[in-house]
Each structure stands twice: as C-alpha cells, then as structure tokens.
Image (cartoon, rainbow, N blue to C red):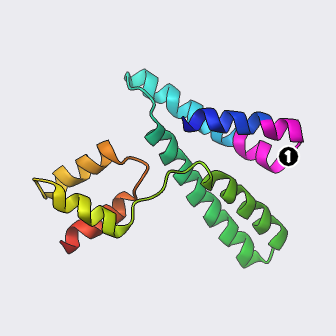
C-alpha cells in the first residue's frame, strides 16, 4: 500500500535527517490523513487510488510552484522542489498511455461518455488522467 511506503520513507528521512524529504512526507501524510477523515465521515473506505490522486495533485502543485521559482530566477528553490517532485513520483502508479486508454475504451460494451468516465474512475482511479480519457473518448 502506498500509504505504508510513505510512512516508512518518512521514518527513514527522520533517521537520515533529510529535512527536504521529511517536510514533504509530513505534508503528504497530513493531506492523506485529512482525506481519510473526510472519507470516513462519508462512510467510504480509503483506497490506494485515493492516495495516488492526492499525490498527483501535490505533484501538480509543486510543478506550478517550481515554474514560478524558475520565472523568478531562484534556482536553489526550484532545484529543491524538483527533488520533492522526484520523491513523490516514486510512489505514483504507472499512468496509462493514450493507446492503452483507447484499447480499454474499445473493449467496453458501452462507449457513452458517462459510462466510460464512471468505468475509468472506478477501475483506474489514480492510474490515468481523466481529462486524457475524455480527449481519447472524443477522438473515437
């Protein structure tokens, strides 16, 4: 489970006194715990797909932050954020390519937008970008 791997990495970062990794893992664990509380209140179990979605969102936020530091000319901070992004990417599942998405859609009995989107959300949550699924579906 992704959450357990992040917890182990957090402990390792504490032992090695890696402040960048420690800060990143603390933020990630807090975000995951908050989502877990929200899911529990709704009576829903937390899955690896939910954790992957949180990691993807954090990666996207960090990429935007890194780009802002690059524009401002602060290479030291942009390098540190790039290190954080690489730490997160170790825990993300392999994303489906456009070709894989297209093959999955073609194998479905119903190719309507609501059915396909629901199918991908249930079965490939965290392993694909839903915007990309929508684009591929429109091409078919």
At horizontal 76% and vertical 76% (from top left) the residue drawn is 72
Residue occupying the point 34% across, 68% down? 98
Left or right position of 3 against 108 = right
Q: Nearer the viewer, residue 16 or 130?
A: 16
> In the image, 112: left or right of 31?
left
Q: Is residue 35 above or below residue 24?
A: above
Q: Position of residue 12 (x, y in %)?
A: 79, 37
In the rendered image, residue 20 lying in the magenta stretch gets the answer yes
Kind of element beneath mark 1: loop
Kindly give the residue lying farthest to the right in the view shown.
17
Q: Position of residue 99 (x, y in %)?
A: 32, 69
Residue 27 lies left or right of residue 54; in this view the side is right
- Magenta segment's dominant SS is helix
The residue positioned 35% from the left and 58% from the top of the image is 130
Q: Nearer the viewer, residue 123 or 66?
A: 123
The front one of 72 and 3 is 3
23 magenta-colored: yes
Q: Which residues are magenta?
A: 12-25
For mark 1, does the 10 Å Cα neighbourhood hold few (<14), some (14 to 19), or many (20 or more) residues? few
Instruction: Give the residue number, with chain letter if any, for mark 1.
Output: 18
Q: Residue 122, how many percent across, how many down?
A: 30, 42
Task: Tally the numbered discs.
Answer: 1
């Amino acid at each position: 489970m992704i959450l357990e791997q992040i917890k182990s990495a957090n402990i390792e970062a504490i032992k090695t006194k890696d402040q960048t990794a420690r800060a990143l893992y603390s933020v990630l664990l807090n975000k995951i715990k908050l989502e877990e509380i929200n899911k529990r209140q709704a009576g829903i179990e937390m899955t690896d797909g939910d954790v992957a979605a949180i990691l993807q969102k954090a990666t996207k936020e960090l990429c935007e932050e890194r780009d802002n530091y690059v524009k401002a000319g602060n290479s030291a901070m942009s390098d540190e954020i790039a290190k954080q992004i690489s730490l997160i990417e170790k825990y993300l599942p392999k994303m489906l390519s456009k070709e894989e998405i297209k093959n999955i859609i073609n194998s479905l009995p119903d190719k309507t937008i609501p059915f396909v989107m629901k199918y991908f959300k249930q079965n490939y949550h965290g392993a694909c970008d839903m915007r990309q699924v929508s684009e591929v579906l429109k091409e078919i």
